[in-house]
């Protein structure tokens, strides 16, 4: 493994077509053992027999979710503090969502408006800057909630957490490469944060899909424009691992975004600029060496005019 330029292989959802095996085969990762993080599957964590039939490399699940549950069962004070933090995060997200909805309505109306071009341009820029300002404010508030928890519960003051964190560091040291599955992105990022795995992940080759890919970005953006439970504006949840910087990753975008609504797509792109917003649908992949995109297939990026273009390697 090139420690200076580890491989990051990002895939779309693995249904209905699986491309994990073919993408991994041409990634250059090699045939060494791979550690698996399937915490986003929750109770199904560790059920990796299907993956093992696809992948030639020996796989070993690190069982983050199960070990977190065991830690919570043994330390009720930690568990209660963790539960309170999650409630505070939910409340912060709810209030952010209330404010976001009004700003998104105003921004879309401003983009649709007709009038003097110079006046419209200034108002449209300001409408988008208000969205960005709210996103930044929300991230700061989320950071504060996490910081309070981390200050009270860390490896310096909690023996059980220190033991688990040390055990994971030792386990990770046996693998040059990791595979991170899709599933519940909230559960996944919370377990990665709980055990402080960010620094170790930075040095590993990583293969990830869906939620697993989302947590590698600077910011985790949730998007629900075509979900069965109703439409919701794209919203920032929290910071990610910042392993794939300056990119917003959007798994199953064709099933969850109104791709033909150029006004909405253009606003999405301008709101998160200068980050590149990438649709990772089933069958797509991005292959990075360090921060350099070496190869891509079927992945598309948003543009400010509301269209999509194929992502091409440098």
Image (tube, rainbow, N blue to C red):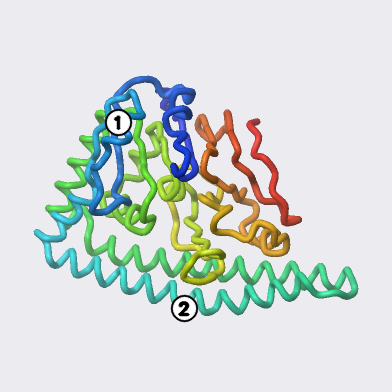
Of circles 2 and 1, the one toward us is 1
Secondary structure beneath dot 2 equals helix
Q: Position of residue 78 (x, y in %)?
A: 17, 64
Q: Residue 95 bears which disc, if any?
A: 2
Q: Quadrant of residue 194?
A: bottom left
Q: Position of residue 50 (x, y in %)?
A: 30, 36
Classify 10 Å Cα crowding around label 2: few (below 14), some (14-19), many (20 and above).
few
Residue at position x 45%, y 63% in the image: 237
Give above or below for 175 relative to 214: above
User: Is 65 left, or right, of 176 in this rendering?
Assistant: left
Residue behind mark 1: 52
- Measure the alpha-carbon separation of dots 2 and 1: 43 Å
Q: Of 147 and 90, which appears nearest the observer? A: 90
Residue at the (21%, 35%) spot, across then down: 170
Mark before the other along the chain sequence, 2 or 1: 1
Q: Residue furthest front?
A: 16
List the single residue furthest toward the left.
74
In the picture, which quadrant includes the C terminus? top right
Instruction: Indicate left or right for 100 with 140 as reference.
Output: right
In the image, is residue 44 above or below residue 170? below
Q: How far across and how far down the image is residue 281, in percent?
A: 54, 46
Q: Quadrant of the N terminus?
A: top left
């Amino acid at each position: 493994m090139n420690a200076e330029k580890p491989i990051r292989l990002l895939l779309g959802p693995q249904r209905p077509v699986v491309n994990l095996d073919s993408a991994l085969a041409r990634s250059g990762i090699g045939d060494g053992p791979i550690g698996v993080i399937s915490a986003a599957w929750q109770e199904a964590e560790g059920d990796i027999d299907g993956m093992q039939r696809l992948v030639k490399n020996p796989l070993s699940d690190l069982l983050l979710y199960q070990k977190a549950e065991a830690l919570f069962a043994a330390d009720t004070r930690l568990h209660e503090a963790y539960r309170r933090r999650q409630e505070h995060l939910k409340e912060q997200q709810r209030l952010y969502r209330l404010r976001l909805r009004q700003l998104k309505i105003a921004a879309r109306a401003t983009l649709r408006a007709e009038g003097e071009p110079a006046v419209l341009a200034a108002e449209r820029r300001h409408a988008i800057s208000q969205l960005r300002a709210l996103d930044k404010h929300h991230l700061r508030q989320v950071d504060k909630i996490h910081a309070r928890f981390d200050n009270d519960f860390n490896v310096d003051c909690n023996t059980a957490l220190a033991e688990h964190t040390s055990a994971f560091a030792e386990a990770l040291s046996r693998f040059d490469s990791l595979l991170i599955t899709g599933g519940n992105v909230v559960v996944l990022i919370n377990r990665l944060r709980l055990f402080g795995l960010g620094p170790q992940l930075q040095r590993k080759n990583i293969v990830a899909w869906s939620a697993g890919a989302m947590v590698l970005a600077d910011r985790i953006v949730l998007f629900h424009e075509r979900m069965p439970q109703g439409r919701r504006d794209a919203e920032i949840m929290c910071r990610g691992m910042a392993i794939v910087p300056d990119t917003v990753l959007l798994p199953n975008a064709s099933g969850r975004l109104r791709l033909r609504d150029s006004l909405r797509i253009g606003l999405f792109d301008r709101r998160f600029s200068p980050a590149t917003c990438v649709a990772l649908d089933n069958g797509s992949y991005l292959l990075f060496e360090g921060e350099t995109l070496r190869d891509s297939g079927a992945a598309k990026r948003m543009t400010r005019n509301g269209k999509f273009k194929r992502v091409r390697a440098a």
